[in-house]
Each structure stands twice: as structure tokens, then as C-alpha cells.
Amino acid sequence: MLSATLVRELVPQVLGQLVRRYGNFGACEDAVQEALLAAAKQWPAAGVPENARAWLRTVASRRLTDELRSSGARRRREDELALRAPADQALAVDPADLDDTPYVDDELRLLFMCCHPQLSAPSQIALTLRAVGGLSTEEIARAFLVPDTTMGQRISRAKQTIKASGVPFEMPPAEERASRLAAVLHVLYLIFNEGYTSTSGDDLTRSDLTSEAIRLTRMVRRDLPDDGEVAGLLALMLLIDARRAARTDASGALVPLAEQDRSRWDHTLVAEGVQLVSDALASSPLGPYQLQAAINAVHAEARSDGDTDWPQIVALYELLALIAPNPMVTLNHAVAVGMARGPQAGLVMLEALDDDNRMATHHRLAAVRAYLQETAGDNDLAAANYRLAARRTTSIPERRYLEGRANRLQPR
């Protein structure tokens, strides 16, 4: 049986070895996908080979060699792979013929390649999920609610960009490594966020994306165990994901943090996250992911919303605003200030975002303003802003939640 777990484990390993050997990322990625199709046809009947990685590498190497020996045209396979039957020779692999080259862990190099700075963020995400995460084009398209052909074209263009860039399959030089690692962590955080609160569609969360982001971040931490920001990002993901079961009620409706049943949180993840961020803060230079993890650790360690240490959270946001200022930090900082010093203080902070083109029409600005107005007792203004936020969001669960808040304050 070709399980999704096995695919996600083997794909980056096989692809990394092929890229190291042949150097053509796009052709290697195509060959791995064809090897997976061959496995999907043979393994359910014949069973998973004892050395599944070597089997896939052998079949992929054959396909790649055949392709490189053929005419110079590179056949585009993104939309036809699922419809093409693998050639017979790819299905017959004699154990004596297996490419049993010792495994070299190239996954981190592969991740750096997928997050090449010449790629846009959507392309980095798509290529990372395909090449390192082992997701199919169809799975990635479904996660981001775009047609399969659109996602296939995005991945193809990304592979062409990688090929044209001539980037070597190796870790970036020392002078580039920090900025490239920052890009890798940013992509993993974007994947996690899309899974934790889907930007559109019927579902509030996509647990497959959050789980994949956590898996990949654990992989990076395995290779960079002393990097405080890698530990901080992993801690942040774990502390947020620990709340997943409590974020919806029995009907699937959104439950905000203040109203969640904390007994439903995954306290094993909480303990791991708290320990990770505590160790990172004690031994590494301060970074934005560590600070965000520390903020979430304060939430996680409070027995109830009323026990939350809001002054400490405000202090952490003040530090975060100094080292990594951005509108979303200001937005969340305003909530913390509103809780620690009163809603009017938080509303004053929000005024700075009204002239920020990145936030002025964002549904979260209207939602936070509504929440603080509700806390201040201004129900009419709060209801109006909840409805404004509901109109602006593309997430159906969020829209229903915001409309429900508005209707409770000002029934139509």
C-alpha cells in the first residue's frame, strides 16, 4: 500500500538524491512523480519493497535517463501524469538492479531550493508542498481552492525558474544563509497559517497543512538544532495547534480563544512548545518567532481567559514591535493593550492602521475594532464593524461567526 505518510517521507529523500546526482530539478521532480505512479500501480498487489526508497530511486533514475537521452524537448507532464500508465519496464524492478546508493539527507538543501528568492511566495509554498511535502498537484490545488491546471502551471513555472537560475544543490553560502533561512521559515509559517485558518472556503482549518508545516519545521530543527528562531517557530506552531480541537463547537462553528474549553487543548503539545521557547529564549539571540511563541505560551499557561497575564503580553508585543514591526503585530498589540489598559486605549492604537494600505480594508481590522467597541459597551458601532468584517472575509466559518456577533448585539 502506497500510504500518504510513506510518500511524504520518501519523496524528498529520493528527489534530493536525484538532484544531487543529475542536477536538473524539474526533470528529477517529474521522474519522481512517475516513479510514484509506478509504485501506485504495483505495490498494492506486490507489496511495498523491503527497500522502498531504493526502488523509487531506481525507477526514477531509469525514467530520468530515458528522458535525458531523448530529444531535447521537455514534455510537460503536470496535467497528464495521472492519466498516463507507466511503461512496463518501470514496473519490473529486479532487487539485484536496485540503485542502493547510501542515503544522504538532502531535505534541508531541497527546502532551501524551493524557497529560492526569485520565486514568489505562492510559488515557494506550492513547490515546497510538492517537492518536500510529497503532496500531489491535485492536493495542493484543493488546499488553496484553485483549479488543478492553475496549480500545475504554477509549479511548472516555479521549476523553470529554478532551472533558469542555475542555483546549485547545496546550502547557501554563509553570507546568504540567514536571509534564505528566514525565507524558509516564512514559507513554513504561511503554510501553517493557511491550514490553521483557511483564507477561504467552507472549512475553518486544514489539518493536513498544519501537520505538514509542523513536520517540515521539525525537519529543519533536526538539521539546525541550535537555531533559536527555528525552535521559536516550531514552538509557535505547537502552541497554536494545541488549541485546534477547542476552536470549533459540535456544529463546526468558530469558538474564539476567550471562550474555548481549555481542557480540550492538547497539553502534550503545550508542554513541548513551552519548553522549546523557554530554552530558545535562554540560549539564543531574541527573534520574532520566539517572541510570538512566548506570547502564545502566556496564553497557554493561563488556566482561563480571566487569568491571562495581559501586561506581560503587552510587554512582549512591545519588544516584537521593536524588532519586527508590521501591521498585524500592531493589530494584535492593540488587542492586548485593550485587555490590559482598557478598550479605549486599544482603539486609539488601531487608528494608525486606518491609513495603512495593507490593513485598511482587511477584515481583521474591522473585527478587532468591533471587539474592542463591544468591550467598551458601544454595541451599535461594534455590530456595524462586525458586519463590515463579515462582508470582507472570504472564510465562510469566520463570516458566520462575525455575523452572529453582530446579530447578538443588534438583531435585525
Image (cartoon, rainbow, N blue to C red):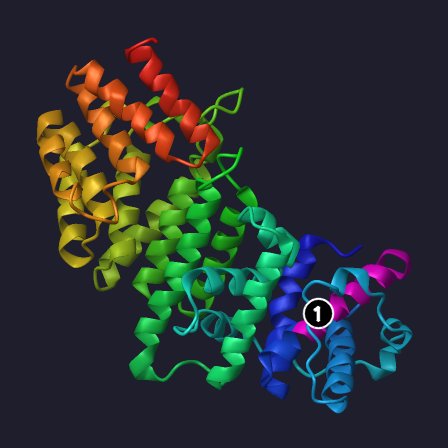
Q: Using residue 183 as the reference point, say whether residue 330 is left or right of it.
A: left
Depicted 95 relative to depicted 122: above or below: below
Residue ID at (48%, 22%) = 249
Segment tinted magenta in the rendering? 30-49
Work out which residue is located at the far top of the displayed protein and give it. Answer: 411
Helix, strand or loop status at disc 1: loop
Give neighbour class at mark 1: few <14, some 14-19, many 20+ (Cα, 10 Å).
Answer: some
Q: Nearer the viewer, residue 70 or 208?
A: 70
Can residue 173 be seen in the rendering of this structure?
A: yes
Residue ID at (38%, 42%) = 239
Residue ID at (39%, 41%) = 240
Location of residue 128 in the rendering, given as x and y in whole percent from the top left corner? 52, 64
Depicted 246 relative to depicted 227: above or below: above
Main secondary structure of the magenta stretch: helix
Location of residue 183 in the rendering, given as x and y in whole percent from the top left corner? 37, 66
Quarter assignment of residue 135: bottom right
Quarter assignment of residue 304: top left
In the rendered image, residue 39 lying in the magenta stretch gets the answer yes
Q: Nearer the viewer, residue 280 or 18?
A: 18
Q: Using residue 200 as the reference point, say whether residue 283 is left or right of it.
A: left
Q: Which residue is mark 1?
A: 77
Q: Nearer the viewer, residue 399 or 240?
A: 399
Q: Quadrant of the N terminus?
A: bottom right
Location of residue 350 in the rendering, given as x and y in whole percent from the top left corner? 15, 37
Quarter assignment of residue 25: bottom right
Location of residue 301 in the rendering, given as x and y in whole percent from the top left corner? 30, 35
Q: Using residue 234 as the reference point, say whether residue 73 is left or right of it.
A: right
Residue ID at (49%, 47%) = 210
Depicted 209 relative to depicted 286: above or below: above
